[in-house]
């Protein structure tokens, strides 16, 4: 799931999807049984001084959906609900919070909020079975305790801690229903180790579908799973 604050990138993948990704939109690529993609600088930005800034989250699929058909869905920035809570501007990227619901479809309960605060803004964080806060920048406190930028803080279940800001700040909240353990090696994720080994063999043999227009091949790491 790609979400940009600044910059732009051009997404292409083996389903045939071609999408320019810009700030504020949600772009969700579901790998399922296997997908190949590229992320390039758009042609009009090549050679232009710019800053690329955003978050790319990997979301586990429920075990029953791990072999689903690969797909890519773009939700434009204008479709994402934006609300004000405790003086802060919140965008409900995925899921529901404070009476607003995102149009982004998910396969399991998921919550993702982009929160822009000014000094003095504050509100209690909504609950989810599992939650974490990540500070992009600014002075932020959680129940009075300072949160450092660039570090994820996992919240205890059942609590509704107060998020507040001492300056202009940007924070995201991510959460959802627990999905159990997953194995991760290189770009492959699965609940089964043998499936990752199979995916590695398929990649080495170049049995994955190709990205139209792309010719570059990235080899596996030398140390195999």
Image (tube, rainbow, N blue to C red):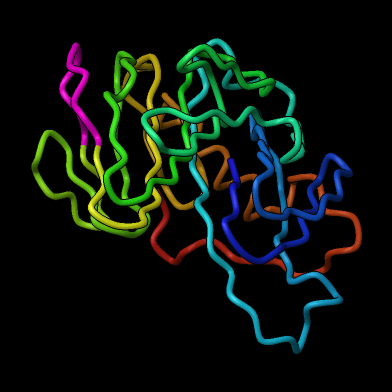
Rendered residue at 44%/40% (across/down): 115
Asked if residue 159 lies in the magenta stretch, the reply is yes
Rendered residue at 21%/19% (across/down): 160
Q: Viewer-proximal residue, 169 or 16?
A: 169
In the image as oriented, which residue stretches furthest toward the left? 145
Rendered residue at 55%/10% (across/down): 64
Q: Viewer-proximal residue, 209 or 78?
A: 78
Q: Is 219 displayed left or right of 9 in the figure?
A: left
Q: How many marks?
A: 0
Q: Is 212 displayed left or right of 75 in the figure?
A: right
Q: Is residue 41 visible?
A: yes
Q: Is residue 72 visible?
A: no
Q: Position of residue 26 (x, y in %)?
A: 66, 39
Asked if residue 225 lies in the magenta stretch, the reply is no
Stretch of the chain drawn in magenta: 154-163
Residue 159 lies, with reference to residue 58, above or below; the image says above
In the picture, the quarter occupied by the N terminus is top right
Q: Position of residue 195 (x, y in %)?
A: 50, 31
Q: Position of residue 56 (x, y in %)?
A: 52, 49
Q: Position of residue 148 (x, y in %)?
A: 19, 56
Residue 153 lies, with reference to residue 161, above or below; the image says below
Q: Viewer-proximal residue, 150 or 221?
A: 150
Q: Is 170 displayed left or right of 68 in the figure?
A: left
Q: Based on the displayed image, in which of its 4 quarters is residue 4 positioned? A: bottom right
- Chief secondary structure of the magenta portion: loop
């Amino acid at each position: 799931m790609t979400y940009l604050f600044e910059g732009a990138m051009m997404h292409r993948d083996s389903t045939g999807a071609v999408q320019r990704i810009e700030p504020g939109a949600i772009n969700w690529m579901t790998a399922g049984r296997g997908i190949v993609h590229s992320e390039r600088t758009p042609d009009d930005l090549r050679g232009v001084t710019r800053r690329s800034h955003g978050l790319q989250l990997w979301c586990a699929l429920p075990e029953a959906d791990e072999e689903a058909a690969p797909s890519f869905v773009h939700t434009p920035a204008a479709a994402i609900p934006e609300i004000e809570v405790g003086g802060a501007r919140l965008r409900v990227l995925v899921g529901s919070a404070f009476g607003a619901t995102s149009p982004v479809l998910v396969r399991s309960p998921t919550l993702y909020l982009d929160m822009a605060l000014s000094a003095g803004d504050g509100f209690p964080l909504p609950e989810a079975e599992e939650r974490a806060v990540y500070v992009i920048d600014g002075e932020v406190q959680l129940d009075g305790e300072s949160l450092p930028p660039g570090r994820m803080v996992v919240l205890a279940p059942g609590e509704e801690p107060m998020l507040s800001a001492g300056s202009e700040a940007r924070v995201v909240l991510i959460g959802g229903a627990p999905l159990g353990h997953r194995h991760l090696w290189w770009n492959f994720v699965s609940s089964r180790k043998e499936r990752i080994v199979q995916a590695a063999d398929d990649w080495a043999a170049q049995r994955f579908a190709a990205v139209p227009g792309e010719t570059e091949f990235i080899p596996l790491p030398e140390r195999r799973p």
